[in-house]
Amino acid sequence: MVLKLAFILDAMAAIVFQDPTQESPVRLLDVLLRHAGTAVEGGAAFAWASRSGIRKLIHDPHFEQFLERGRFHLIVGLDTTTDARALEALRAAEDRFPGLKLQMFVTPPEHGIFHPKLTWFRNKSGGIVVVGSGNLTERGLTESWEAFSELQIGEAEMVEVYRTWECWIEQQQPYLLPASSPAVAELAGANILDWSEERAKTSARLQRARNPRVLLCEIGKGRISKKGLQEDVGKNAFTQFFQVTSNRESVIFGLVESPDSLLSYTAKPIEKGSDNLCFEMQVPRYVYGARPIAIFLELRSGVFLYAIVRNGEAEYEELQAYLHENLPGKKESEMKRWSARVNAVNHFTVVKMLLAAVRHIT
């Protein structure tokens, strides 16, 4: 179904650019809060949400006042970014505010992704429709370069908008699940949030977030276990780079094979009280003596993307040379592992691919 708003555009429409470089930028958050202040009802569909974005909008005092007097139907997608923390924040808000109706959109596998960013409010004189590029994230609401249209409509047009919204929701019922659904929890738990979403409050931590750690690591033949192929990453990498501690239950890895796709991601449990310094990884077969090189990029504590470069593939020789240059005393038979900040190795195409994958999944 197509929502025909051509006649509305002839009425009162504004195209707004959110530009974080401006001294006093017009922010999507401010526009939504302003209209929530006079609304009696509303709804929104966002492709994804983050915990910080939920706090910014839903827990703003003005929006909380709106939820106490009116109704708001919120639909959020789960294709990426909406992680377990975001889901927890959404469920807590739904429990707190009776006027908030929350549904999660589960995309059918044979189609694309859920990608709308639309909000509407009904007020005494008609309503407002905001359509744009910003998601329910802190960056989308306040910090990123975004664009959106702000459409002010009369009572008759608002009736048509509401009717179309309800018809669309009716059509999407097979894909709309309550936030309490186990399927929703599983999808949210698998999502990986961009490391820059949880930005640091101090300059030192902020610098680390902008310049994350990378590990270049030769991969041995490994050994077969009941759970899969185990690869020894060494004690220093295990404890210092991956920061495995007695309090950590698992480490999450995401395998990247192209700049625009995360091939797979999974949590690797850590066996307590074990001297095993291995992780189970998806490692391709290779000719003995020509060790593949794994490149790990830290997204946030306990969450990593990685790619594997084999002998004969692009940049393998350059990566080997880099390891030899930084580890001159290592024997040929010894495994070579080197950790650095991303700005020291971002000239490698494989590192650029991992960084591109971060942008794609967020």
Image: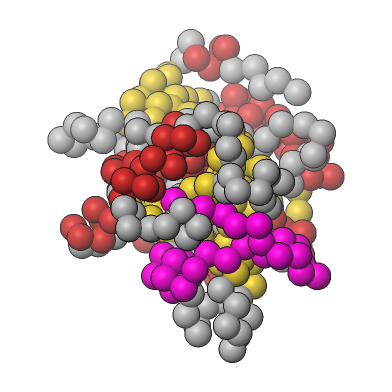
In this view, the residue in front, 325 or 362, is 325
Is residue 227 found inside the magenta-colored segment of the image? yes
The answer to whether 222 is drawn above or below residue 249 in the figure is above
In the displayed orientation, state which residue is furthest to the bottom.
273
Q: Magenta part of the protein: which range?
A: 216-243
In this view, the residue in front, 157 or 110, is 110
Q: Is residue 359 visible?
A: no
Q: Residue at (46%, 53%) from the top-left corner?
A: 332
Q: Residue at (50%, 83%) from the top-left corner?
A: 247
Q: Residue at (71%, 65%) from the top-left corner?
A: 223
Q: Residue at (66%, 27%) from the top-left corner?
A: 160
The answer to whether 214 is drawn above or below residue 160 in the figure is below
Q: Position of residue 188 (x, y in %)?
A: 64, 57
Q: Position of residue 48 (x, y in %)?
A: 56, 45
Q: Position of residue 152 (x, y in %)?
A: 46, 26
In this view, the residue in front, 191 or 39, is 191
Is residue 265 found inside the magenta-colored segment of the image? no
Q: Is residue 194 visible?
A: yes
Q: Position of residue 356 (x, y in %)?
A: 47, 35
Query: Relative to residue 249, is residue 284 drawn left or right?
Result: right
The answer to whether 241 is drawn above or below residue 215 in the figure is below
